[in-house]
Amino acid sequence: MIPGGGQPNMQQLLQQAQKMQQDLARAQEELAATEVDGQAGGGLVRATVNGSGELRGLVIDPKAVDPEDTETLADLIVAAVQAANENAQQLQQEKLGPLAQGLGGMPGLPF
């Protein structure tokens, strides 16, 4: 800061913004590498997504497969993927929430 309440030091602001950008990029990389699960039907269908919400795996117990009732299986798959994505969103909040709050205090940034 300039003595007497002038404008903030632009160099400091730029360094702070660069550090926050690096922290955000690192957190996003960690999210992409972290996998979370969701399940439905008491574990008959399990979906795995990464922290960014990308579907990485799907496990279907043979007991869930009924050729006469594929609609229930489809519902279980959708529910498991949704549960996994909810877990991924929670993880995103934990990892990115503090960074987004930090960016919100910087003038000129739309957060």
Image (spheres, helix red, strand yellow):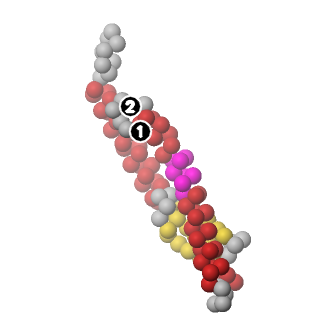
**Vertical placement of residue 107 versus 110, above or below:** above
Closer-to-camera residue (21/75): 75
Q: Disc number at residue 111?
A: 1
Q: Disc number at residue 24?
A: none
Q: Residue 25: x, y in percent?
A: 39, 48
**Vertical placement of residue 25 versus 33, above or below:** above
The structure residue drawn at horizontal position 69% and vertical position 83%, both measured from the top left corner, is: 63
10 Å crowding of disc 2: few (<14), some (14-19), many (20+)? few
Which residue is disc 2 drawn over?
Answer: 106
Q: Secondary structure at mark 1?
A: loop
**Relative horizontal placement of residue 49, taking residue 5 as reference (left or right):** right
Q: Main secondary structure of the magenta part?
A: helix
Report the quarter where the C terminus lies. Answer: top left
Let me know if residue 91 is in the magenta part.
yes
Which contiguous range is marked in magenta? 88-95
Displayed quadrant of residue 64? bottom right
Q: Residue 106: x, y in percent?
A: 38, 31
Q: Residue 34: x, y in percent?
A: 51, 59
Q: Residue 103: x, y in percent?
A: 41, 36
What's the distance in space between the residues labelled 1 and 2, CA to CA? 9 Å
- Marks 1 and 2 in Cβ contact (< 8 Å): yes
Q: Secondary structure at mark 2?
A: loop
Q: Foreground mark, 1 or 2?
A: 1
